[in-house]
Image (cartoon, rainbow, N blue to C red):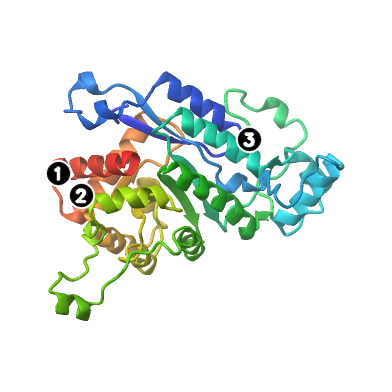
Amino acid sequence: MKCRVLTAMSSRAQDQELMAQIAEKYPIQRELVLDATGSRDLALAQVLPSFGWHPWFSHQLYDDSISDYQHGDRDAFKVSHYQAVLTPSPVDQDFMRSLPHPQPLSKYIAQAKVYLESYPLALVGEVGLDRSFRLPSAWLPGQEDVRDSAITPGGREGRRLSPYRVRIEHQQKVLKSQLSLAATMQRAVSVHGVQAHGTVFETLRETWKGCEREVVSKRSQKRRGDAPNSDVDRWDDTTEEEEEESEVSEAFPPRICLHSYTGPLESLKQYLHPSVPAKIYFSFSAGISLSAMAPTKTIDVIRAVPDDRLLVESDLHCAGDEMDQRLEEMARSLCSIKGWTLEDGVCRLGKNWAEFAFG
């Protein structure tokens, strides 16, 4: 990689231990990253791990605070769970047999907490909501026998998509549990949102309800002689002592990245409101932001993102040349849109990433 650090996301059961293994093999060194000068000697492979359960796999978890199959028929519970959390409610027995037995949500949260404790710099991700995703169909006869064993199981692997989606209410339960964990551990979060921008915002807003920052009206500011509220400087109103005190008591994640952001300008303004106490970052990727399907308003959104809240990503499933190329392509586009020189822009993006990751 030309990229100095790989921020890797996990998404389902099969990823968690693999993420821990790669974090052990390529440990992140915060001081080395922050003190980097661009020397090739410092360009060591490092991985910032992230532990999370993606909405595409949220159906594989069940809310054991409501029900459990420990004292009942395991197979019957599996059927009733999937019929409750999927829409339309499936009746295809072959499809339901192809799905894994669901895991208790509390067990996953406890496991994720152990990993976060083991890796003090680790993030929570990738989590979120997705209204468009459909589950893959069951394997066709013989298809599973010839699958590529080098690929981590649990993914789609070329299967056709079924008509079934995960109910947004269930996705929210899984997301809220992980946001609560991130708040408790005071870790940054990477959030996925597709066709659910308003619901993502409302779900995140619930975490900081009651902790909003006071917004002084322009009339009151004028009376007091204060400077008007600024979108760029809105987080600079508190003292360091106030920030340290607030970090202990916050019920919300301190830093949130909306990854491969595709929301409209109106949603962006909601996140940038001066009352929002969390630091919200917006990340863009060439595969999504620069695709032919991306709306032209993406440029207006990027221009409206405060310079210190802008991030770049590959949104790719593998590291290497293609990942580096996608990062470079998006970085060059961001610099062009923002009117930055390439050197200045890359430095800004690197600093933003460090502040998002490490605080």
Q: Is residue 259 visible?
A: no
Numbered disc in front, either 1 or 2: 1
**Residue at 26% from the left image edge and 73% from the top image edge:** 216
**First reached walking from the N terminus: tag 1 or tag 3:** 3
Please provide percent x and percent y for residue 62.
69, 47
Instruction: Check the image and report above or below for 321 versus 286.
Output: above
Label 3 sits on a secondary structure element that is loop
Q: Can you identify the residue that label 3 sits on?
A: 154
Instruction: Please tell me whether residue 25 is drawn above or below residue 13 in the rendered image.
Output: above
Distance between the alpha carbons at the discs numbered 1 and 2:
8 Å
Q: Amino acid at mark 1?
A: Asp
Q: Amino acid at mark 2?
A: Cys
- Residue 127 visible, this angle: yes
Q: CA distance from mark 2 to mark 3?
A: 38 Å
Q: Element under label 2? A: helix
Tell me where residue 189 appears, x and y as whole percent: 43, 46
Disc 1 on helix, strand or loop? helix
Crowding at dot 3, Cα within 10 Å, few <14 / some 14-19 / many 20+, comes out as few
Q: Please tell me whether residue 219 is drawn above or below residue 357 in the rendered image.
A: below
Location of residue 102 in the rendering, given as x and y in whole percent from the top left corner: 72, 41
Mark 2 or mark 3, earlier in chain: 3
Determine crowd level at label 1: few under 14, some 14-19, many 20+ residues with C-alpha closer than 10 A. Answer: few
The disc placed on residue 344 is 1
Q: Give the residue type that dot 3 points to.
A: Gly
Earlier along the polypeptide chain: callout 1 or callout 2? 2
- Front in this rendered view, residue 300 or 82: 82
Q: Which residue is mark 2?
A: 335
